[in-house]
Amino acid sequence: MPWAPELFSAPALERLLEKRRRAELLAVPFFYGLTAGEVDALIDSFADEPVVHDPVRGRIRGIPEFEAFVIEMKGWLAEHNVSVENVDHVILPARGFEEVILHLHGESGPVDLPVAIVADRRRRGRIQELRIYYSGWQLTGSHINRPPLLQPDPALRPPDYVTAYLSALAAGDVEGVVNAFEPDGYAREPAGGSFVHRGHEQLRAFYEQWCSNSGGIPLERCALIEGGDTCVLEYNIVQWGATKLSPQAGVAVFTRGPSGRLSAARMYDDADPPTRP
């Protein structure tokens, strides 16, 4: 996800198939496509002109702007000696997402940067637009505080195991949040790295801090992708406890465990909390 494999050259696809140890591909992964050196394949993967939303560059629209973005990204990946760890993906006819961890050399040492890419897809699986999510905390030590990319959809209905978590989080109900997880379930903060809280004891301590500003964290639900035991929710953060916030974009990846509760909640936003978890 998200590039169309039929647009790439045979050598590029053969390298990817060998790397993935697969006989066929439904889509070419985002970062492999950037580094394959076949910009025309990336451009032609869009249904119309390229549209990409990047946390730093904002909206990139049009072929010249997209080409410049690809050149800049390739340079950044090479400069920081980035390797890509694949985490999860879902490919559906109208939407898809890809989740990776970028292992790179930062200014003060190794960095593990979680990145999520969401694609809206149109005819023949071509892309309508891409939305990239990651936190700037690991790279710069500060938050980007990203404006909304989507509007809330009141009709959106996440699956029950996600709704239980969202309702408890919005209410500041720490025990409700903890009980939404499997006993060995975990939550990963947007910064990734060591910001992982596994098991009910660690989860309780983490969410007590997150809900320590006299309330919970309600999220505007904007778009949903469901595939198997994975649910991806794009959202806007609008409030953190007693503090009202300007709406800020994010996405979370939820996975369902064997008992029907959360086995994982991985978040990708860059809001600056009123109280630092």
Image (cartoon, rainbow, N blue to C red):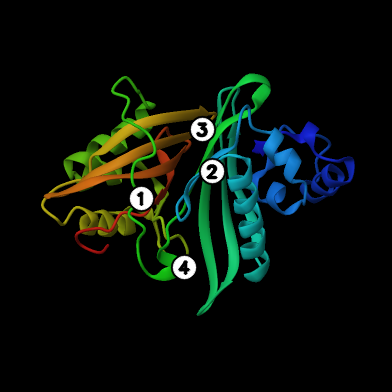
Q: Amino acid type of disc 2? A: Ile
From the image, tell me which residue sits under label 1. Answer: 146
Crowd tier of the residue under label 1, counting other residues whose Cα lies within 10 Å: few below 14, some 14–19, many 20 or above: many
- Residue 233 appears in the rendering: yes
Crowd tier of the residue under label 3, counting other residues whose Cα lies within 10 Å: few below 14, some 14–19, many 20 or above: few
- Mark 2–mark 4 distance (CA, rounded to whole Å): 18 Å
Does the CB distance between marks 1 and 2 fall below 8 Å? no
- Mark 4–mark 3 distance (CA, rounded to whole Å): 31 Å
Closer to the camera: disc 4 or disc 3?
A: 4
> Which type of secondary structure does the marked residue at label 3 adopt?
loop
In percent of the image, x 33 and y 59: which residue is there? Answer: 202
Closer to the camera: disc 1 or disc 3?
A: 1
Residue 86: image x %, image y %? Answer: 63, 50
From the image, tell me which residue sits under label 2. Answer: 117
Closer to the camera: disc 1 or disc 4?
A: 1
In percent of the image, x 44 and y 67: which residue is there? Answer: 138
What quarter of the picture does the N terminus occupy? top right
Q: Earlier in the sequence, mark 4 or mark 3?
A: 4
- Residue 194 appears in the rendering: no
What quarter of the picture does the C terminus occupy? bottom left
Q: Earlier in the sequence, mark 1 or mark 4?
A: 4
Q: Is residue 128 above or below residue 80?
A: above
Residue 140: image x %, image y %? Answer: 42, 69
From the image, tell me which residue sits under label 3. Answer: 229
Numbered badge on residue 139: 4
